[in-house]
Image (tube, helix red, strand yellow):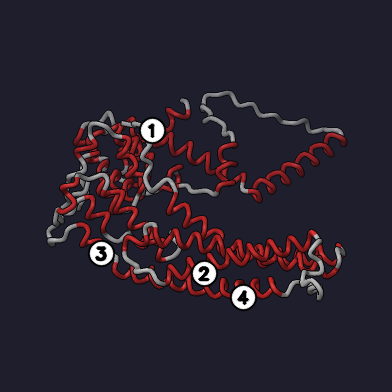
């Protein structure tokens, strides 16, 4: 019996012996690719790994048993090869290659098991599917964002798309409530059936827009750094869902008499205040740093190293290249720090309305942090250029000082650059949903 047939046989036994087989699989999103979020370099390693196909059990397996009386030279070679294998294994583990390889194997086997389960389920009638806990497993997969499970289950049992959970919520309503953007993106891969989902309501009279207007679960908000970015993500969810539904449904009231916009304002009142506090605290601390750099650079522009010629009033070292670097970097640092302070003052004096967190405030923060980083870097260049003028080009003194001057710039980049990238991607990135998803059903 081939491995695939063996898996199918085991799946049949599990389905018959346990009604929780599908639920167990649907509540394990970590074994599927959609739930894996490796870093950029890990994704590169993952794509380069070649994994062996699943070997059939009826294949011939040859085992080589070496002779008992090996010559001593062969024993030495075997020992060296064994040590090299251990070294390679430890190296792969250290670099994360083995972890990515094991993860890829898990994805392959989980995909095989899922396909076998769905193949068997597609041959069952409706009553047997209910006994196999198809509907609870499907909604559990939606809640956990197990994309592969959802797609295979819909292909095997198309009626699960319109089945509802305990709150009378369908596939896309539940995915919006649980903030599963990958599952909501499946909406764009539909064609004829798409319009049938946008006007549905749950047991509380909530539309898709009402569910998007509610505060996200804490587990999803905690993934985003800073209350201001959390508020921005909530607004992005609301705006994206608002573009999906019919315009006439925007003023639809639920059983509590609330329209979606009123519900959003009510649920996000605390988060709005926290976002305002976070923005003001960040802007205040950065304004202090920027103002300090302005003071230093303005003073340095009129106290050039070496002083001035008394007769002409020109700097003594004005013809040196290092002096040109000093003046240019000083001016750039002064102008960029001034721009940074103005941006942070714009944040402090903002009205902090809900819509400001969508684009206005993040854009000011991006410009402020970028120019502040640039001003710090050019300030270090100004300092190094001044030292080059004073020590008259002595490399044994200049090189260590330049290396030490790179430390504060590096620290600032390590602390603030990830936040800057996150804000930029969140504000000007491709968006929450994959609207270019190809038709899959």
In 3D space, how far apart are the residues under numbered discs 2 and 4 (Cα atoms)? 12 Å
Q: Quadrant of residue 297?
A: bottom right
Q: Which residue is mark 3?
A: 265
In 3D space, how far apart are the residues under numbered discs 4 and 1 (Cα atoms)? 67 Å
CA neighbours of label 3 inside 10 A, class few (<14), some (14 to 19), many (20+): some
Instruction: Residue 25: tell me if it is visible.
Output: no
In percent of width and height, residue 87 lies at: 73, 46
Q: Residue at x 44, y 58 (%)?
A: 363
- Residue furthest to the front in view is 311
CA neighbours of label 4 inside 10 A, class few (<14), some (14 to 19), many (20+): few
- Mark 1 vs mark 2: in front: 2
Q: Residue at x 44, y 29 (%)?
A: 4
Q: Secondary structure at mark 3?
A: helix
In 3D space, how far apart are the residues under numbered discs 3 and 4 (Cα atoms)? 42 Å
Q: Nearer the viewer, residue 114 or 244?
A: 244
In the visual, does 46 lie left or right of 228?
right
Q: Secondary structure at mark 2?
A: helix
Mark nearer the N terminus (2 vs 4) = 4
Mark nearer the N terminus (3 vs 4) = 3
In 3D space, how far apart are the residues under numbered discs 1 and 3 (Cα atoms)? 44 Å
- Mark 3 vs mark 2: in front: 2
Q: Residue at x 87, y 64 (%)?
A: 394
Mark nearer the N terminus (4 vs 1) = 1
Instruction: Residue 240: tell me if it is visible.
Output: yes
In 3D space, how far apart are the residues under numbered discs 3 and 2 (Cα atoms)? 31 Å
Q: Secondary structure at mark 4?
A: helix
Q: Which mark is residue 341?
A: 2
Q: Secondary structure at mark 1?
A: helix
Q: Quadrant of residue 412?
A: bottom right
Mark nearer the N terminus (1 vs 2) = 1
């Amino acid at each position: 019996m081939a491995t695939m047939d063996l898996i199918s046989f085991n799946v049949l036994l599990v389905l018959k012996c346990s009604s929780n087989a599908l639920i167990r699989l649907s509540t394990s999103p970590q074994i599927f690719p959609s739930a894996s979020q490796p870093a950029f370099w890990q994704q590169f390693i993952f794509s380069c790994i070649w994994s062996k196909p699943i070997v059939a059990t009826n294949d011939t397996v040859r085992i080589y048993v070496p002779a008992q009386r090996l010559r001593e030279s062969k024993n030495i070679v075997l020992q060296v090869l064994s040590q090299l294998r251990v070294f390679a294994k430890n190296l792969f583990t250290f670099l994360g290659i083995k972890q990515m390889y094991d993860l890829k194997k898990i994805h392959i086997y989980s995909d095989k098991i899922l396909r076998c389960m769905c193949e068997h389920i597609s041959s069952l009638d409706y009553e047997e599917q209910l006994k196999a806990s198809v509907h609870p497993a499907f909604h559990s997969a939606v809640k956990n964002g197990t994309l592969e499970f959802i797609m295979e289950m819909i292909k095997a049992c198309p009626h699960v798309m319109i089945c509802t959970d305990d709150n009378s919520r369908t596939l896309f309503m539940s995915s919006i409530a649980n903030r599963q953007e990958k599952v909501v993106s499946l909406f764009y891969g539909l064609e004829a059936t798409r319009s049938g989902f946008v006007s549905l309501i749950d047991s509380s009279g909530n539309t898709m827009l009402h569910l998007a207007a509610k505060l996200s679960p804490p587990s999803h908000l905690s993934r985003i750094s800073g209350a201001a970015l959390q508020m921005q993500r909530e607004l992005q969810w609301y705006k994206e869902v608002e573009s999906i539904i019919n315009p006439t449904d925007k003023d639809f009231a639920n059983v509590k008499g609330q329209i979606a916009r009123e519900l959003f304002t009510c649920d996000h009142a605390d988060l709005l205040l926290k976002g305002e506090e976070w923005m003001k605290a960040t802007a205040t601390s950065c304004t202090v740093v920027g103002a300090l750099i302005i003071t230093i650079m303005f003073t340095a522009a009129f106290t050039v190293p070496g002083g001035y010629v008394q007769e002409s009033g020109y700097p003594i070292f004005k013809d040196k290249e290092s002096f040109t670097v000093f003046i240019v970097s000083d001016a750039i640092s002064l102008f960029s720090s001034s721009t940074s302070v103005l941006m942070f003052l714009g944040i402090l004096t903002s009205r902090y309305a809900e819509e400001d967190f969508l684009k206005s405030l993040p854009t000011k923060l991006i410009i402020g942090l970028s120019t502040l980083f640039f001003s710090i870097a050019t300030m270090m260049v100004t300092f190094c250029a001044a030292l080059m003028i004073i020590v008259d080009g002595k490399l044994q003194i200049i090189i260590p000082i330049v290396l030490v001057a790179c430390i504060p710039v590096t620290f600032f980049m390590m602390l603030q650059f990830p936040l800057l990238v996150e804000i930029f991607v969140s504000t000007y990135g491709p968006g929450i949903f994959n609207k270019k998803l190809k038709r899959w059903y």
